[in-house]
Image (spheres, rainbow, N blue to C red):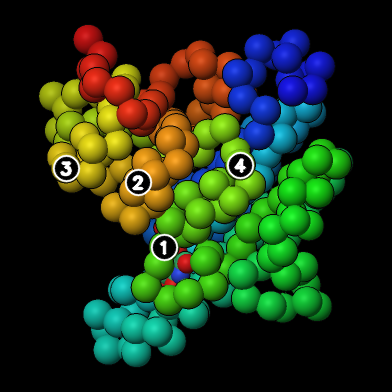
Amino acid sequence: MTTAARKQNFPYKRVLLKVSGEALMGKGPSGVDPEMVDMVAADIAAVAATGGQVCLVVGGGNIFRGLAAAAKGMDRVQGDYAGMLATVINALMLQNALEKRNVETRVMTAIRMEAIAEPYIRRRAVRHMDKGRVVIFAAGTGNPFFTTDTAAALRANEMECDALFKGTQVDGVYSADPRQNPDAERYAQLTYMDALSRNLKVMDAAAVSLARENSLPIIVFNIHVPGAFASVMRGEGRFTRIIETESSSEH
Ligand code: UDP
């Protein structure tokens, strides 16, 4: 761990942050809100400035989802490729916002498009991270029928990250949607099996299973609270941790 990261009491040396497309959407029904992108970039920059090694997987649901397009008659595979391209738009926006804050970044895509980003090569990605660059993984896994949650679990394992942070609109995993049910209970900690069997909609099952196989902790927090990423990295604030132990709920 770097001295700066230790000074901040980050228990993690290297983490992957999954930023969903929705997190970049702001209040509109779709698209990208540059203010939102900048807010997320500010949080990432704060962690990077302290020496925490961060890589990102960016979603694309704010622009295009293959499944939704298929429901309206589009070929599913074509739709999924369009969805993967949508993640590249978000990645470039995030790269721009981070570089404005003097954070050195690299975008790496699972589908080659070398005019705008490097192709994903694991060893090269590791080297970027060792040099303190924030690596943004775009185009998901490069395969249709997957999601960027699965891409996040995959890349986090490949990069040997200490944890996968999932930035959402709420401050953890609840027993029901807290925006619709005020009695919904927030869990401080869950097991992978809880997340899978209780259908809690944390991440898709493939992503949770992949994390479980490699004992990769998943930490769910509200990315729209300014400074939350750094606090949660220090173990402070509100979040749900998904690990391989008995479940417990917050009272
Ligand atoms: N997608 C895909 N393969 C992947 C990752 C993503 O086909 O490995 C497509 C899929 O159509 C998905 C879209 O890209 O709907 C956007 O990704 P996702 O829905 O995961 O974004 P998020 O919900 O995080 O914004």
Which of the marked residues, 2 or 3, is nearer the chain's N terminus?
3
What residue appears at the point 49 percent right and 80 percent down from the top-left corner?
81
Is label 1's Cβ within 8 Å of ligand 1? yes
Q: Which residue is mark 2?
A: 208
User: Crowdedness of circle 3 by 10 Å Cα count: few (<14), some, many (20+)?
Assistant: few
Q: Marks 3 and 4: which is nearer the front?
A: 4
Q: Quadrant of the N terminus?
A: top right
Judge from the rendering whether residue 94 lies leftward or rightward of residue 20; answer left or right. Answer: right
Name the amino acid type tagged 3.
Answer: Ser
Q: Marks 2 and 4: which is nearer the front?
A: 4
Name the amino acid type tagged 1.
Answer: Thr
Task: Measure the C-alpha gap from mark 2 to mark 4.
Answer: 16 Å
Q: Is residue 64 visible?
A: no
What residue appears at the point 63 percent right and 47 percent down from the top-left corner?
159
Q: Which residue is mark 1?
A: 147
Tag 2 near tag 3, CB within 8 Å: no
Q: Which residue is mark 3?
A: 197
Q: Is residue 181 visible?
A: yes
